[in-house]
Amino acid sequence: MAGIVLIGAQWGDEGKGKATDLIGTKIDYVARFNGGNNAGHTVVVGDESYALHLLPSGILSPNVTPIIGNGVVVDPEVLFEEIDALESRGVDCSRLLVSEGAHIIAPYHRVIDKVTERFLGKRKIGTTGRGIGPTYADKINRVGIRVHDLFNESHLRDKVEASLHQKNQMLVKLYNRRPLEVDAVTEELLQLGERLRPYVANTSLVLNKALDEGKTVLFEGGQATMLDIDHGTYPFVTSSNPTAGGACTGTGVGPTKINRVIGVAKAYVTRVGEGPFPTELFDEQGEWLRKQGHEFGVTTGRPRRCGWFDAVVTRYASRINGLTDIVLTKLDVLTGLKEIPICVAYDVEQEDGTHIRLEDMPVDQSQFAAAQPVYETMPGWDEDISQIHSFDDLPETTQRYVRRLEELSGCRISAIGTGPQRDHIIEIHSLID
């Protein structure tokens, strides 16, 4: 039995798809456990590039069963668009299983997400506008629609009517929008449900049986640690738990069945949306990282904010998630730099004008927002590392950079991404024992 959790150790977009693909030939199931189609990652296979949003990256491995767990919020229309796009390119999606307990993103969730964010103005959170937050809000308020509700027309209509009774009041009176029709929404969801039906299963049961039979399950998180609703830079976070604990609640698998927790971190840091970001670069160096790393959102197309590696964040992610391994991605992007700064601590000015040095993540977000990075500088390298397949063959300065990040992060670095292709990776330690 092997239960492996794979999560982002920064603010997302770290290359989790590449890490999943690395161990995909050794696993039997890949289960997404949080988020929705606000997530996105790119997997490159040969000359083909696949942008995935809602589907687990295991969908690209023919011997893997991909699962969308109960912790995910599902927009069926988006799911079918993604399935159709992959199948048109020869990818078989028939193995996909969707939890009958997952919550459904209804049309009114998307509407509310967009008008609310617009209404907030400069106080906006920076959501993708895809209805993720409102769907999770309905889940917590116990008025959500789950996958199994799509197969009971009268029950579904009652739930839509109850939900729209309140939401239409808000849309009309607060946002000056037209009300949504109960019949139209119900009919749309019923039709989507009919196509979804063949994929629906009791995925908690499937996963637990698989683990009991000695199968290997990879639990794949969307977004990342610093966007966790409980442990991230609140309120500039997502609406779910992309940390390791979310793997259990988001799939119905107990923590005693988790053997390894792998965190994925870039050799620098990026962030999309609003919120504090201590090492963010606003100069030509930030633009250089953005261009070299092709840092534009897979889901939104938005340019990502870029900054130097933040060891405080990665050390925090190691602790919160109980990381056993780190996969360090995009190391090749730093090629050509003479010097590479690493944030090792924060300098925070207090109200009385004094300064304190923080080497651990502050819970007080006002302190985090005021944090100034304390940098340590390492020498860079000029050599092309994309064709190197052994850590010992890397330039000496590259090895020193990686070892220093490992020391600062408090967790071993087990693999290194050295380029965009599938084989552009160095495995230092096996990710599956």
Image (cartoon, rainbow, N blue to C red):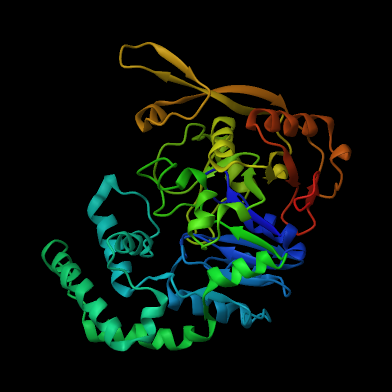
Residue 246 visible, this angle: yes
* Residue 27 vertical position relative to residue 119 in the rendered view, above or below: below
In this rendering, is residue 30 above or below 221? below
Q: Measured along the vertical axis of the image, is residue 339 above or below residue 215?
A: above
Quarter holding residue 421: bottom right
Q: Residue at x 37, y 42 (%)?
A: 234
Quarter occupied by the N terminus? bottom right
Pick the residue in front: 162 or 46: 162
Q: Position of residue 103 (x, y in %)?
A: 40, 69
The residue lying at 52 percent from left, 75 percent from top is 202
Residue 49 in sight here = no
Residue at the extreme left of the image, as rendered: 173
| Left or right: 224 in relation to 104 | right
Residue 152 image-quadrant placement:
bottom left
For residue 78, side relative to residue 344 (left or right): left
Q: Residue at x 71, y 66 (%)?
A: 215
Q: How many marks?
A: 0
Q: Nearer the viewer, residue 88 or 24?
A: 24
Query: Residue 211 appears at what percent x and percent y?
Result: 66, 64
Q: Horizontally, is 74 left or right of 331 in the view? A: left
Pinpoint residue 369: horizontal percent, then vertical percent.
Answer: 39, 31
Measured as percent of width and height from the top left, residue 254 is found at 55, 56
x 67%, y 65%: residue:
212
Q: In the displayed structure, does residue 73 sit left or right of residue 406?
A: left
Which is more toward the observer, 61 or 180? 61
